[in-house]
Amino acid sequence: MRIHALNIPFDRLAEPADQDLAALRHRLDGLLDGLPEPAGQASRRVAVYGMSPAGRRIRRDLAENRPHWDVAAYDLRGAAASDAFAVLPVSELASPPPRVVVNCAPPRGVLASTACIEQAAPDADMILWHDPHEYVETAHDAYDLYFEALSPQPAPAAASLAAAVRHSYLAAASRQWREAAAPEGEGSDDLGQTLDRTLSAILRDEADDDQGKVRRLLELADRHPFFTIARDAAACLLVRLDRPGQAVAALAPAVRRYPHCHRTLAKLAELHLLAGDREQARQCAARATPLVSSGSRLRRDYELLAAQPREAVAGKWRARPLRPPLQPRQVALHCAVPVWGEAFVDLFMRVTLRSLFAPGNLPYAVGRHPVRFTIYTDPADVDRIRAYPEWRRLNELADVRLERIDDVLAQSDGPGGNRYDRMSRCQDHALATSGRENRFTFFPLADLLFSSHFLQRGLEWLEAGYDTIFFAGMRYAKERLLREAVPQLSRDDAIIAPAKTLFAHAAKAIHPIYQRKIRGDHAELHPNSYFAADADGNIYQHFFAPTPIFIAPQPAAVSIAATLDADLGYSVTDGGLGNFRYVTDTADFLLLELTSEHADTGERQIPGPCPMAACANWLRHAIDPVNKLLGAHTVILRQADGPGLAPEARRLARQVRSLLL
């Protein structure tokens, strides 16, 4: 199979331009005129694969302008008759085989479609309608296509195309990023903590006026360009000074550097609105909208953003927290967990709950705080849950409620199709309930095992004034921990494990996925975590999507657009300007995520290390400003005490700092 490219830039919704259709007809004329006539076949048989708007328009155009050709339409599984022509499944492509296939698949699917077409019609020529090379240089999700190109391809032409895609992506990534290796001793401290503390110190400095703080914040952002939170804070101060035009100028460099960050685009749209430029506000919001999933509340907010009253937007910006001093307060707690299915219910009741029965967890919490516990489940699991002795123990400790997931989904306006969507809608419901009742939310997922003072430490931080507590953990082999660790740590109705003792068990049962992450010998679909280990058994981690596991009552409705760890942190910390704590040392605060070694976790890996330029490019486009800051922190999963960071941790910190530069 020979592959020819038309180099048409990808637009998901646009129909082809007339000049592009003419170019395709010209290319087809040349190919068909130059091909030998196979015996017994129509000499002008052309297949159009992929019934996107482009594919349908091309099929109609060829029928109108080349009526003597035998043109057929195909898609992966076929479709109902469309525009007065049949759409056949690709499995029928070889009956009879076409002379030329026009592949209109979107770039994300170009490798799979090419392999499928090549296997069905290996002697045909193929024209790629969309330009995959332009796509990997400009699209925010181009890393996904690069990752697919790392996989072995089942046919020669697809393999050649994959090699070309890899080359184009790495060339583009390397132009945007070059490894800025810090000299030994420089940049090896905890950059995340340094930036976090510096931001708080500037904003809380009573000796400096707001204009002086703006200057210092912009200088901080210039020194660390990925730290766009500093620009956001400067813009907020300028709004308070009634200088929205200067606020636009303060934040705009963040959009130029990260043009696919929908959070920053939306903020810049609001600032343009405050500055009186509703058209620029509309354009920024239009750029942000397609970057979030269709049907989400966030997308609807972006679609309506430019029409908001200026006074409402100004009030929102002036009310933003800007790292106020910590104030001790009373805390009421709402524990909320979605769990369904026999296996997960059993794990939750026998392991997760029993670890929360340790004296430093629920017994501590209910002795000092009002506590409600909500379990979201399916109707089929209600009686199963109530049959466990742990159910009775939980009711002795707390005010417990069972919520039916179907009822929650019926009230929700978000997607609820897969298990992660179902969990997110339940967590949205829990956050809304907590907001109405002025409770802090704690999310103990159904497959977690907690250290014996987890809730006590978390509640102490909440009482001290932190609004969000983040934690980044790993997956551990469930079968081994249930077989070896849980029996040793069980005491009557509880699992009691100090954090370092728990990690000593866990370190022997690290899930194979995370063993590969620690070794660094596999490329990942989501390269959001980086690891090192020292001789004492401590593991060091930089994670760009930690979980907000404790969350203050929210003054306005928030919703999870993707998953708890992917995007909620930005919302509940007001883009990093609220008071939050990231637990970076697990000496007395640890949870384990228990996962079967045979489970499909969705964390795809391919043998072979991922080039630094590719990882840096993924982080640049896929990670929001809060998760960039959190990822710059060094997290210690601790077995042994020691002074400061080990050399392995310092080397890892320099590597991550280089990725962020």
Image (cartoon, helix red, strand yellow):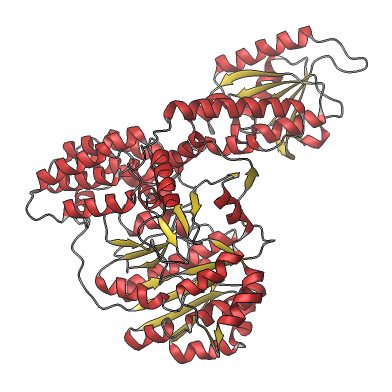
Give the vertical position of 446 relative to 317 (above or below): below
In the rendered image, which quarter is residue 126 located in?
Answer: top right
Task: Give coordinates of residue 178: x percent, y percent.
Answer: 43, 30
Task: Give coordinates of residue 660: x percent, y percent.
Answer: 39, 40
| Front residue of 458 and 194 | 194
Task: Give coordinates of residue 564: x percent, y percent.
Answer: 46, 60
Q: Residue at x 44, y 47 (%)?
A: 652
Q: Residue at x 65, y 27 (%)?
A: 163
| Front residue of 354 and 193 | 193
In the rendered image, which quarter is residue 243 located in?
Answer: top left
Give the vertical position of 445 relative to 183 (above or below): below
Q: Residue at x 71, y 8 (%)?
A: 30
- In the shown orientation, is residue 206 left or right of residue 44? left
- In the shown orientation, is residue 3 left or right of residue 311? right
| Front residue of 644 and 53 | 644
Task: Give coordinates of residue 514: x percent, y percent.
Answer: 58, 56
| Front residue of 435 and 228 | 228
Q: Quadrant of the N terminus?
A: top right
Q: Residue at x 23, y 42 (%)?
A: 220
Residue 348 in view (yes/no): yes
Residue 10 in view (yes/no): no
Give the vertical position of 202 relative to 268 (above or below): below
In the rendered image, which quarter is residue 608 located in?
Answer: top right
Q: Quadrant of the C terminus?
A: top left
